[in-house]
Amino acid sequence: MTLAARPIAMTIGVFDGLHRGHRQVIQATVDAAREHGGMAWVTTFDPHPDTIVRGLPPRPWITPPEEREELLHAWGVDRVHVERFDRSVQALDPEGFIDRVLGAGAPLRVLVIGPDFRMGKDRVGDRAYLESLGLRRGFSVREIPFLTQPGGTKLSSTLLRRLLEQGNVEEAKRMLGRPYALRGRIGSGAGRGTQLGYPTANLEVHPEKLLPAPGIYVSENRFLDRGSRGLTYVGSAGTFGPGPVRVEVHLLDHPGREPLRGKWLVTNLVKRLRGDQVFGSPEELVSAMDQDRARAAEYWSSEKEKGGGG
């Protein structure tokens, strides 16, 4: 690792989801870097350390590493280091890990942590340990308190994951401070949506991205630098037989003349209308989709009355 010349403020963590609690830690890191005229540095991991330390099977990411890096830079982080977590990393003590990431003698000035932060072999690197190490190496430790939900529940990636698995994207949005987004290039599909009068963009989502509970979602979409309201479907289209889970976006504001295949699309899920269903015929499916569209219109109308939409 090349020795950085500028002072460094760093935080370390998985940060899956990058919810409002994470953002508080990230903002403190950026602020500390600016105080020292230096770089805000975030070290994160892939795969999740639990797959190595606890032997848990890999789980889909709420924010895969590439998406995480993009968000962190948007929040003012100068450098995102994704550490490949393996047994050799697990065996490092805190000082060895810092040297591995930053380089021996790098000018670390501030290490930002949360109240339950531990690092290094056997999790020895708690706040007291790190403060002692900082006295010797010239950095301070700043602890950022947890952010909690009403009722005192700590914001966590575990809670966020549970909400998404339930399809509760409205509560997830409150945790995230933004809608839950699925993104990818638009690929080819079977063309059934067009035949039914509901053409869809078939989104090629990152294979390790967590998909929310199957169903129909009201969505706000971005593509070709334009916005479009829509209905987003997550499911396996069981009405037409077994198949893989897919993400299909019906864009309500797209004129339909411009080809979408190959374009990049982001669909922000704002409300789940219903769960996935298997219908007895295509006609029953179209009737349900007509109802979905009407309920979506009611949602946007109510948001406009509340001042939440245009």
Image (cartoon, grey):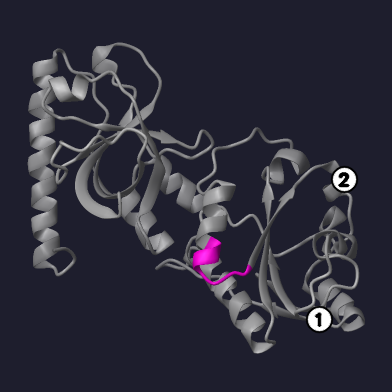
Residue 201's x, y, as percent? 28, 33
Query: What residue is shown at x 12% (from left), y 29% (from top)?
Result: 288
Above/below status of 105 relative to 210: below
Residue 109 occupies quadrant: bottom right
Across and down, in percent, residue 293 comes to 11, 40
Dot 1 corresponds to which residue? 139
What is the secondary structure assignment of the residue under circle 1? Answer: loop
Quadrant housing the N terminus = bottom right
* Residue 18 visible to an observer of this rendering: no
- The residue drawn where x is 56% and y is 49% is 66
Instruction: Single out the residue that lies furthest toward the bottom.
Output: 35
Q: Amino acid at mark 1?
A: Phe
In the rendered image of this protein, does residue 89 appear above or below residue 111? above
**Could you say whether the residue bearing mark 2 is in a helix, strand or loop?**
helix
- Kindly identify the residue that appears in the image at 25 percent across and 54 percent down: 226
Residue at 87%, 45% in the rendered image: 88
Q: Earlier in the sequence, mark 1 or mark 2?
A: 2
Q: Quadrant of residue 275?
A: top left
Instruction: Residue 33: give x, y in percent of width and height.
Output: 66, 80
Verify whether residue 220 appears in magenta: no
- Is 144 located above or below residue 54 in the figure? below
Q: Is residue 260 left or right of residue 60?
A: left
Check whether the beta carbons of the residues at disc 1 and disc 2 lie within 8 A of each other.
no
233 or 6: nearer the viewer = 6
Q: Quadrant of residue 247?
A: top left
Q: CA distance from mark 1 to mark 2?
A: 25 Å
196 left or right of 206 in image? left
Query: How many numbered marks appear?
Result: 2
The mark found on residue 88 in the picture is: 2
